[in-house]
Every structure is written in structure tokens, then in C-alpha cells.
């Protein structure tokens, strides 16, 4: 059977780093509060010349170089983002143009923090259906542009950045020993909309709006939802937590990551953590963490890697990949 195998990874971060101490004087907060509640110590914030498209392009170019590929080798771009450059056209098409691609096709996916998990699952379905051979799957966000910088309960949590993977159609035996995407489970439930949303949009206010979140409510649901989709993914693949080499969760909050890993019985040393350096970069957080752990040599060919995310909607999901 056809498997979607990871051929390359890449990442891009804005130049400017904002440390927790930089919020003091802007809103009533402290480094101690932010670190204790979230594990975040700093985040990257996009300057005026850095956008979702430019960061996504840089991550895509790095992933292509990492895989020894050029834009000519790609036939589809799927970009996970909730902070597109424009309402339309899709920012994926802008990235396609920036890469100099006049062939193939590109589109955006919007599932907020779960966007990358949704995008990998979609790209895998396109590859297995024979609709694409090599797909650039990108998560790129500039959440700094939709934050209310006077709201201390949200502005300290998010950052900007991008990560990318190239997935390539490869013949596999159809067993759990194959490389590539092996199992996935996606969920959404719109009854939770008011807990995490942006209070503007083209069809309602005609404005971009700002992120609003009832953090405590999101926290309450997060661990249960995350563990449900992970257990569904394990049972699809016929594995247990002990079979995993790496757990690469959405980087929203260290306490949510720790509680989920503990509930699932995933050893601490198998968990990739970047939330301390990047904050919550929404759809970019999983590919950023993946790329960092692959480039620094932690994630190796043949390793079994579990990706997971949960975010606005609510949306949530998990993907199992053999590297
Ligand atoms: N600095 C200091 N105090 C603060 C800050 C701050 N930055 N923000 C809030 N507080 C205060 C609150 O006002 C509250 O004060 P009160 O007790 O006087 O009312 C107190 O701190 C405690 O607030 P809580 O909201 O109960 O704090 P909690 O321990 O729940 O931590 C947090 C808040 C970090 C937001 C947490 O709830 C969380 O991480 N939630 C989940 C967020 C998440 O995972 N989102 C994922 C999806 S994101 C996406 O999809 C885009």
C-alpha cells in the first residue's frame, strides 16, 4: 500500500524574541506567574516585514533543502493557519508563488491549534488516493496580530513561527513496521465555540477581531480530549504508549502536556518540549517541535512518533508516524 513518508523537515522563527519580563509594565503579570502556570519563558514575535506567508515560505524552503528537494518536486501545498495574510486568496497559494511554483495546487486548512494534525491527515489521504505524490505540509502563524495586548490572560501565551514537512508517496507493506503515516484520529465539537474564538470575521463584523479564551474552561477539557484521540490512534495501530519513541504534542501549556503524558503512561524523556522557547504558536507548534527534534538528531529514521493537538472549535486530533 501507499504510505506518506516524511522526506524533510524545516522551521522558521521571527527575529525578535520577547521574554516574559518584557510584559512587565505592559500588563499586570510576572515571569514567575507565566512560568509556573504555562512553562513559557519567551516567544518570537513577527516584525512588520514578517508574515504568515514569509515564515511559511522560509520553513518550506528549509524542509525542501533538508529532503534534498526543490519546489519542482512538490505537487501540493497544504498550509495550516488561522492567521492568513489575507482573507483570500489562500496564503498557501502565496507561498506557492513565493517558491516560484507555477504547477500543482495549494490550499489553506483552518483548525486552529489542531491545524497541522488535520493538514497531515489530509495530505496523507490525498497521497493514498493518488491525488499527489509529494506534499509540503506547513503550519505557519502570526498570532501576535490577533492578540489583545491589554488582556494579560491571553497575550502572554502565544507566539509566532512556522514549521514544515515534506510527505512523499512510498510503497509500504501495509504493516506497523512501515515508515510513514500509520494511523490518525480527528475530532471536532462546535458546542465549545465560546471558550476559544476570535471576536471578528469577514461575514460577521467585517473586521479581523481578537482572540478570546476562557483558559480555565479550555484546560478542563484538554487532557480528556487529547487522551481520547490518542487512545483511538493507538487502538487503530495496535500499539501501546510503550511502543512510542517520541511524543510531540501541541505546545500550549507544559502542565497540559505533562498531565496528558502521565495519564497515557508516556515516559517524560520521550516528550519533546518547545513551549518554553516558543509559547503557543497554534498550527505551527507541532511542526516546529518536530523539526527541532529531527534536526538535532533526537528523532531518527524508524522511530515511532506520536503527534497530538487540541484547539479552538474545539478541534482535536492525533497522528502516528514512523519516521
Ligand atoms: N499574569 C498574572 N495573573 C494572571 C494572568 C497573567 N498573565 N492571567 C490571568 N491571571 C490571573 C487571573 O485573573 C486569575 O485571577 P483571580 O483568581 O483573581 O481571578 C488567576 O490569575 C488565575 O487564573 P486562571 O485562569 O484560573 O489560571 P490558570 O491556572 O487556569 O492558568 C491558563 C491560565 C494558563 C490560561 C490555563 O488555564 C491554560 O493554559 N488554559 C488552556 C489554554 C490552552 O491550552 N489553549 C490551547 C488551545 S489554544 C488555540 O487553540 C488557539
Image (cartoon, rainbow, N blue to C red):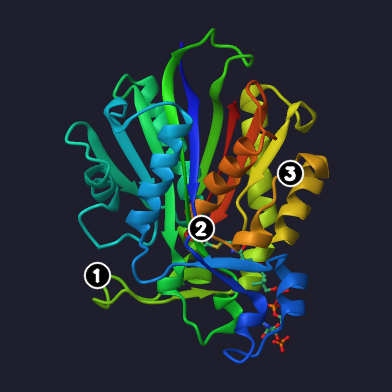
Camera-side residue of 59 and 106: 59
Q: Is residue 71 above or below residue 114?
A: above
> Which quadrant does the C terminus fall into?
top right
Circle 2 residues within 10 Å: few <14, some 14–19, many ≥20:
many
Going from the N terminus, do you reach mark 3 or mark 1 first? 1
Circle 1 residues within 10 Å: few <14, some 14–19, many ≥20:
few
Q: Residue furthest top?
A: 173
Q: CA distance from mark 3 to mark 1?
A: 39 Å
Residue occupying the point 64% across, 14% down = 177
Q: Nearer the viewer, mark 3 or mark 1?
A: 3
Q: Is residue 19 above or below residue 102?
A: below
What number is the disc on residue 90?
A: none
Q: Is residue 273 left or right of residue 80?
A: right
Residue occupying the point 29% across, 24% down = 131
Q: Is mark 1 within 8 Å of ligand 1?
A: no
| Residue 194 visible somewhere in the drawing | yes
Q: Is mark 2 within 8 Å of ligand 1?
A: yes
Going from the N terminus, do you reach mark 3 or mark 2 first? 3
Q: Is residue 121 left or right of residue 273?
A: left
Residue 176: horizontal and vertical position, in percent? Answer: 63, 16
| Residue 126 visible somewhere in the drawing | no
Q: Are marks 3 and 1 in contact (CB under 8 Å)?
A: no
Q: CA distance from mark 3 to mark 2?
A: 18 Å
Q: Is residue 50 left or right of residue 285?
A: left
Residue occupying the point 40% across, 28% down = 125
Q: CA distance from mark 1 to mark 2?
A: 21 Å
Residue 133: horizontal and vertical position, in percent? Answer: 34, 22
Secondary structure, mark 2, is helix
What number is the disc on residue 271?
A: 3
Q: Which residue is mark 2?
A: 282
Amino acid at each position: 500500500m501507499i504510505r506518506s513518508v516524511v522526506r524533510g523537515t524545516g522551521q522558521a522563527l521571527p527575529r525578535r524574541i520577547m521574554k516574559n519580563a518584557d510584559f512587565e509594565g505592559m500588563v499586570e503579570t510576572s515571569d514567575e506567574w507565566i512560568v509556573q502556570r504555562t512553562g513559557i519563558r519567551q516567544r518570537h514575535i513577527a516584525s512588520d516585514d514578517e508574515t504568515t506567508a514569509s515564515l511559511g515560505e522560509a520553513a518550506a524552503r528549509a524542509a525542501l533543502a533538508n529532503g534534498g528537494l526543490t519546489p519542482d518536486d512538490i505537487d501540493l501545498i497544504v498550509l495550516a493557519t488561522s492567521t492568513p495574510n489575507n482573507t483570500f486568496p489562500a496564503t498557501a497559494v502565496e507561498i506557492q508563488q513565493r517558491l516560484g511554483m507555477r504547477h500543482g495546487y495549494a490550499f489553506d486548512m483552518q483548525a486552529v491549534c489542531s491545524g497541522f494534525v488535520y493538514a497531515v491527515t489530509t495530505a496523507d489521504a490525498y497521497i493514498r488516493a493518488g491525488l499527489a505524490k509529494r506534499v509540503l505540509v506547513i503550519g505557519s502563524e502570526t498570532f501576535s496580530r490577533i492578540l489583545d495586548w491589554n488582556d494579560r490572560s491571553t497575550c502572554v501565551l502565544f507566539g509566532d513561527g512556522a514549521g514544515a514537512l515534506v510527505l512523499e508517496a512510498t510503497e509500504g507493506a501495509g504493516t506497523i513496521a512501515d515508515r510513514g503515516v500509520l494511523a490518525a484520529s480527528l475530532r471536532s465539537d462546535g458546542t465549545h465555540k465560546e471558550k476559544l474564538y476570535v471576536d471578528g470575521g469577514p461575514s460577521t463584523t467585517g473586521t479581523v477581531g481578537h482572540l478570546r479564551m476562557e483558559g480555565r474552561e479550555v484546560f478542563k477539557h484538554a487532557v480528556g480530549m487529547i487522551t481520547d484521540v490518542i487512545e483511538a490512534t493507538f487502538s487503530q495501530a495496535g500499539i501501546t504508549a510503550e511502543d512510542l519513541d517520541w511524543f510531540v504534542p501541541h505546545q500550549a501549556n507544559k502542565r497540559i502536556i505533562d498531565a496528558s503524558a502521565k495519564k497515557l503512561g508516556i515516559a517524560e524523556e520521550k516528550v519533546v518540549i518547545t513551549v518554553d522557547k516558543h509559547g503557543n504558536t497554534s498550527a505551527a507548534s507541532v511542526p516546529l517541535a518536530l523539526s527541532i527534534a529531527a534536526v538535532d538528531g533526537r528523532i531518527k529514521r524508524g522511530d515511532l512518533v506520536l503527534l497530538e493537538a487540541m484547539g479552538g472549535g474545539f478541534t482535536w486530533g492525533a497522528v502516528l508516524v514512523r519516521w
